[in-house]
Image: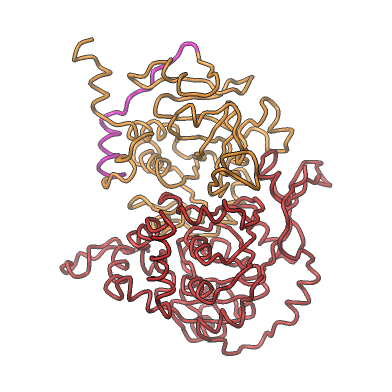
């Protein structure tokens, strides 16, 4: 069987080698603003991939800015995509999508307007699975043009993918050849970064190490900036090295309303408000006008959502402890560690 | 029928979701590995870990390995899935582990399931470019349904959901019947195992690979189980009756696993 779907990105690793060759390997200050990072590095028509897990460790500030700046015609890696997909769909930013997991918000439900966007025919999809997109990024990270896999065989998921069946030259067994996925731009939210782009991620990595290696351009948003010695003194902390990174922005609470492991839990009330607003085009427009288009930047959004008071509550939730204001001494939770 | 009819009394003592979770948990033995999603599967795995299988290895596809779940996660990648975990790793490593044959059980669901256990979580309608309703798609479901040793499905049962042919095979069951997984290239020895519904526990006929009722829940009739399927269900002889949730199961489920009733407070429909 041969998948009928389209491949949205360049697969030839030699073209990508040229591209990666031209990247500067200098240790240099890459700190910029959210506005400038998106304006300079993400263009209409680019293929975009988002780090994290949909509603966990997502670069919300960058996603909002992409919508605010009105990016159109993007390709989108629908890999574990939940709230990130919802934000970009709100801006009708993409018109083609590698679909492994799209539209839904896991157990929370399926937002109506986001679903409508996909059903309207405005988005061309090619089907994959979570493993398939992870492995496609792995192939790209290895600098090769395809990777054999044993998922998807015999299904309609395979039929609407862009994979091709091959035989193993050693055992004769059937495999699916998955094309490497080299995104134009990756946006990834991390716990700590230095000005050069060295990054530290705590908790699950999803596919973000391979994503950073596979992408032509990498934009990092970080909860906080740290000195380079943070990495030089403890190299195990370097989840993503600086030479893969093109821009760094510091955004405290940058994954809100998503969960940021060891920092703050997801804001389920706000995500529910968003989900409910998607019930009709009118309520959704009003919601987006208030939260996305009516705010100048991400800190305006955070203020609107309850500011530091709310962030403190989400931090308490993350650490499984009673609200800080009600807490008496000695009852602190044990935290995520 | 008198008021001390055991089924009537038991029926009043638990709800459909509690029954689903308790029955599902009994299939997870100590020392096995299971990949779970949010909702009933994670509740079942937590219950199993507390009652029967303290060494059950719980794996979350996003990268959480062997956590001591303090509360029910909302996302399969959220902080709860790495609480006191042995490892917080990548999705790629979890999928590699699955491909190497280290995942014994997985729990899946879908909008449609057919007589061979094929699952649809992609779309209603057969025109891919113009779906009547679009769903999230495979996520990791196809990967687990392809590569885990035993696939379990926990789902409400209705004729709308149990269809002769799914609109879109997102995740492979036995595909077209005996031998078709092997012909497709899927690893031998893998595939559908049990389907646990609000009415019955179903398995698959060893030769024909067709779905077969193995036991019906207390108070449910065989006709009811048949009426809630769009295809003809085989029925095992002799047909068993599912053990109702025990006092122990209900106590641990209500007090320790799901005190906020996030799962057991819902309706099993």
Q: Which quadrant: the N terminus of chain A?
A: top right
Q: Is residue B239 magenta?
A: yes
**According to the rendering, which colour does chain A have?**
red
Q: How is the image coloured?
A: by chain
Vertical side of B46 occupied by A316: above or below: below
Question: What letter labels the chain drawn in orange?
Answer: B
Q: Position of residue B112 (x, y in %)?
A: 53, 35
Left or right of residue B157, residue B253 in this image: left
Name the residue located 39 percent from the left edge and 29 percent from the top edge: B198
Please say if B238 is above or below A44: above
Q: Quadrant of the C terminus of chain A?
A: bottom left
For this orientation, the residue located farthest to the right is: A169
Residue B141 at what x, y percent from top left? Answer: 56, 44
Q: Position of residue B105 (x, y in %)?
A: 52, 38
Q: Nearer the viewer, residue A91 or A271?
A: A91
Residue at the image position 29 percent from the left and 28 percent from the top: B246
Q: Is residue B204 or residue B164 the one in the foreground?
A: B164
- Report the span colored magenta: B237-258
Quarter occupied by residue A56: bottom left
């Amino acid at each position: 069987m041969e998948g009928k779907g389209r491949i949205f990105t360049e697969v030839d690793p030699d073209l990508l080698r040229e591209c990666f060759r031209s990247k500067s390997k200098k240790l240099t200050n890459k700190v910029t603003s959210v506005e400038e990072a998106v304006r300079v590095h993400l263009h209409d028509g680019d293929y975009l991939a988002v780090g994290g897990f949909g509603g966990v460790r997502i670069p919300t500030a960058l996603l909002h800015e992409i919508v605010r700046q009105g990016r159109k015609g993007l390709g989108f890696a629908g890999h574990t995509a939940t709230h990130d997909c919802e934000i970009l769909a709100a801006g009708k930013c993409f018109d083609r999508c590698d679909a492994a997991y799209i539209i839904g918000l896991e157990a929370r439900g399926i937002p109506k307007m986001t679903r409508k966007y996909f059903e309207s025919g405005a988005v061309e999809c090619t089907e994959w699975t979570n493993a398939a997109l992870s492995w496609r990024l792995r192939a790209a990270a290895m600098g090769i043009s395809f990777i054999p896999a044993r998922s998807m065989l015999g299904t309609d998921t395979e039929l609407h993918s862009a994979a091709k069946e091959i035989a193993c030259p050693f055992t004769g067994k059937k495999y699916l050849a998955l094309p490497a996925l080299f995104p134009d731009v990756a946006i990834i939210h991390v716990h700590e970064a230095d000005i050069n782009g060295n990054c530290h991620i705590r908790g699950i990595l999803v596919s973000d190490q391979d994503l950073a290696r596979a992408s032509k351009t990498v934009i990092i948003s970080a909860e906080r900036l740290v000195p380079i010695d943070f990495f030089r003194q403890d190299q195990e902390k370097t989840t993503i090295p600086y030479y893969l990174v093109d821009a760094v922005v510091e955004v405290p609470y940058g994954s809100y309303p998503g969960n940021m492991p060891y920092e703050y839990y997801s804001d389920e009330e706000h995500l529910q408000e968003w989900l409910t607003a998607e019930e009709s085009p009118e309520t959704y427009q009003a919601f987006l006008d208030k939260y996305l288009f009516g705010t100048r930047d991400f800190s305006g959004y955070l203020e609107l959502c309850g500011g530091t008071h709310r962030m403190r509550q989400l931090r308490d939730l993350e650490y499984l402890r009673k609200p800080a204001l009600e807490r008496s001494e000695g009852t602190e939770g044990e935290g995520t560690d | 029928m008198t008021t001390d009819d055991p089924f009537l009394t038991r029926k009043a003592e638990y709800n459909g979701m509690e029954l689903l979770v308790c029955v599902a948990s009994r299939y997870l033995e100590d020392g096995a590995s299971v990949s779970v999603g949010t909702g009933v599967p994670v509740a079942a795995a937590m219950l199993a870990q507390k009652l029967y299988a303290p060494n059950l290895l719980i794996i979350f596809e996003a990268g959480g390995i062997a956590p001591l779940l303090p509360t029910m996660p909302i996302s399969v990648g959220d902080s709860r899935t790495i609480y006191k975990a042995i490892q917080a790793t990548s999705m790629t490593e979890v999928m590699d582990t699955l491909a190497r044959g280290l995942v014994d059980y997985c729990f899946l669901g879908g909008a449609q399931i057919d007589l061979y256990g094929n699952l649809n979580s992609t779309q209603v309608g057969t025109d891919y470019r113009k779906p009547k309703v679009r769903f999230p798609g495979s996520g990791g479901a196809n990967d687990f349904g392809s590569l885990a040793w035993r696939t379990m499905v926990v789902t409400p049962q209705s004729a709308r959901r149990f269809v002769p042919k799914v609109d879109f095979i997102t995740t492979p069951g036995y595909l077209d019947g005996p031998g078709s997984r092997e012909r497709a290239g899927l690893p031998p020895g893998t595939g559908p195992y049990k389907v646990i519904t609000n009415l019955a526990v179903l398995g698959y006929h060893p030769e024909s690979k067709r779905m077969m009722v193995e036991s019906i829940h207390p108070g449910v009739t065989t006709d009811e189980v048949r009426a809630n399927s769009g295809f003809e269900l085989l029925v095992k002889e002799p047909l068993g009756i599912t053990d109702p949730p025990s006092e122990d199961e209900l106590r641990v489920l209500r007090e320790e696993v799901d005190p906020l009733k996030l799962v057991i407070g819902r309706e099993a429909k």
